[in-house]
């Protein structure tokens, strides 16, 4: 009988893309996607430990899965992702009913390990300390992938991170930065375009340093023509020029490495969207230094101004952490000032959470009182929502290109899509429209987290078959 799987994903886009790859590998091995847990034989929990204390949650979830597993012969549980990489055999020791534990460097082994576990009497744990240097297994996109959407694709350009941000567990669980060969990225985007994908998002922890390791390696191998210069701008141009690709996005750049070549590539490549995710983390120079971020608030704002000069109408989102150890009221005031000055369109805001193994987790003497952090968080949200609303309202009256994503979760007769500025738009279509289509929508109202609009015209009908059933009024 055909076996069915479910992948539950926690965390960031990198993890979501790894999940697509796990699904692709399982399908290549003959499994099909289950509609529900009841229906599933294999449950994969692709974990994250970046921002929250995911540990308790995972062990809680695994506890709940014990009866699920016992209910039917042959059911298997896989734990993958960053938390598995960090906790290693602890996962298997705490939850003996888990079948496979694999880390961030060996996703390609998912199906093999599942097979191995059938014969095994104890959980099969395979965690590699570093990535296997082989394009086919290293970069999520280079393996079979079961993409969640047919019109949009994530493309990994780099894995790992060479920075040492004091709060961040990523370098420990994802390893050092390794860039994917240039041609392999462009080839994948061509393949995606040939399959009907029109929007790609380039993924990396620090996309502006893309290629540095490749150039250094070429130099070391005696290639004197290898110039040490930023390659990311070139990549944007080449990916953006692939026929059929209407939109290119990327995440995330690092303010310390982002420079004019990225801005000019954004400005001169029509398919690159007018949106920049530009993580601030803190507005205080003192805290930025404690975090080892490598820039000051002034430099952050100067670069932001350059980006906005180069790309008119640029929408900017950010990540900010409040309550980093030692953050004083004064430091926090700087964050409020810089956030107000930056006029963000959107922000992901976090309360600092110690990740065991990171430098900041050791600073227990200067941890900020949780009550103080919560209050700072609420004050920061007010500043963010103020600029989000103003930015969204500034779009009222404009007619914008919207990529149709599907029916709105709250009201299925309303369609949701995204503008080039990465803003969510809700509108009522005059007729059924396929997901993946591009339409022109006149923006009628800007709210803090979304826009409302009026359908104006079809720009490009999706060639994919999925049509959103719409109750036409
Ligand atoms: N505590 C709070 N926020 C964190 N982030 C990363 N690590 C932590 C942590 N330990 C946030 C940063 C980063 C985003 C992906 O998650 O803002 O940019
Ligand atoms: Fe973490 Fe800093 Fe690397 Fe981003 S740049 S992944 S925050 S260490």
Image: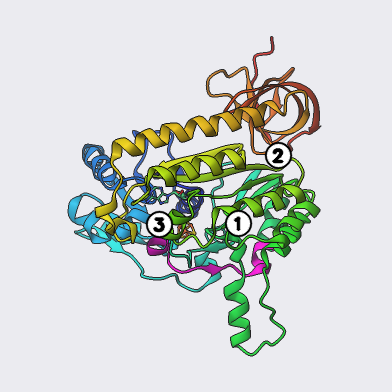
**Mark pair 2, 3: CA separation:** 30 Å
Image position, residue 73 (x, y; %):
25, 43
Quarter of the image with the N terminus is top left
Element type where label 2 sits in the image: loop
Q: Are marks 1 and 3 in contact (CB under 8 Å)?
A: no
Mark 3, ligand 2, within 8 Å: the answer is yes
193 vs 361, nearest the viewer: 361
Q: Which residue is mark 3?
A: 168
Tell me which residue sits at (40%, 57%) in the image.
Answer: 168
**Mark pair 1, 2: CA separation:** 27 Å
18 vs 394, nearest the viewer: 394
Q: Residues within 10 Å of mark 1 (few under 14, many from 20)?
A: few
Point out which mark residue 385 bears.
none
Q: Which residue is mark 2?
A: 420
Which badge, 1 or 3, comes first in the chain's sequence?
3
294 vs 45, nearest the viewer: 294
Magenta segment, which residues? 170-186
Point out which mark residue 299 bears.
1
Q: Are marks 1 and 2 in contact (CB under 8 Å)?
A: no
In this view, the residue farthest toward the bottom is 222
Q: Is residue 75 above or below residue 403?
A: below
Residue depth check, mark 1 versus mark 3: number of the one nearer the observer:
1
Residue depth check, mark 1 versus mark 2: number of the one nearer the observer:
1
């Amino acid at each position: 009988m055909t076996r069915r799987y479910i992948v539950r994903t926690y965390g960031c886009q990198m993890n979501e893309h790894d999940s697509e790859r796990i699904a692709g590998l399982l399908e290549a091995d003959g499994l099909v996607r289950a509609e529900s847990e009841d229906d599933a034989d294999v449950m994969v929990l692709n974990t994250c430990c970046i921002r929250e204390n995911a540990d308790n949650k995972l062990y809680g979830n695994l506890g709940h899965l014990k009866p699920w597993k016992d209910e039917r012969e042959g059911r298997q549980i896989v734990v993958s992702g960053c938390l598995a990489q960090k906790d290693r055999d602890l996962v298997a020791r705490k939850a003996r009913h888990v079948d496979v534990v694999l880390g961030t460097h060996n996703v390609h082994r998912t199906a093999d390990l599942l097979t191995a576990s059938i014969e095994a009497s104890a959980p099969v744990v395979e965690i590699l300390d570093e990535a296997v240097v082989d394009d086919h297994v290293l970069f999520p996109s280079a393996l079979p992938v079961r993409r969640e959407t047919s019109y949009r694709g994530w493309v990994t350009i780099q894995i790992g991170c060479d920075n040492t941000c004091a709060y961040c567990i990523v370098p420990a669980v994802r390893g050092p930065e390794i860039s994917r060969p240039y041609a392999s990225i462009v080839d994948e985007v061509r393949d995606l375009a040939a399959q009907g994908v029109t929007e790609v998002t380039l993924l990396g922890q620090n996309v502006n340093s893309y290629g540095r390791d490749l150039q250094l390696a070429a130099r070391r191998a005696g290639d004197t023509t290898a110039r040490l210069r930023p390659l990311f701008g070139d990549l944007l141009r080449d990916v953006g020029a692939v026929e059929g690709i209407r939109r290119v996005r990327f995440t995330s750049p690092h303010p310390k490495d982002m420079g004019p070549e990225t801005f000019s590539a954004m400005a001169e490549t029509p398919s690159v969207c007018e949106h920049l995710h530009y993580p601030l983390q803190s507005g205080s120079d003192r805290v930025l230094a404690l975090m080892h971020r490598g820039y000051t608030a002034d430099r952050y704002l100067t670069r932001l101004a350059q980006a906005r000069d180069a790309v008119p109408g640029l929408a900017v989102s950010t990540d900010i952490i409040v309550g980093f150890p030692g953050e004083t009221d004064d430091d926090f005031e700087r964050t409020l000032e810089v956030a107000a000055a930056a006029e963000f369109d959107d922000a992901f805001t976090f309360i600092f959470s110690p990740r065991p193994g990171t430098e900041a987790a050791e600073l227990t003497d200067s941890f900020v009182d949780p009550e103080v952090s919560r209050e700072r968080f609420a004050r920061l949200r007010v500043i963010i929502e103020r600029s989000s609303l103003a930015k969204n309202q500034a779009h009222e009256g404009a007619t914008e290109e919207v990529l149709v994503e599907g029916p709105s979760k709250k009201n299925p007769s309303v369609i949701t899509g995204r503008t080039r500025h990465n803003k969510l738009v809700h509108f009522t279509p005059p007729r059924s429209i396929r997901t993946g289509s591009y339409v022109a929508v006149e923006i009628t109202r800007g709210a803090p987290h979304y826009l409302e609009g009026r359908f104006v015209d079809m720009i490009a009908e999706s060639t994919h078959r999925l049509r959103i059933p719409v109750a036409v009024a």
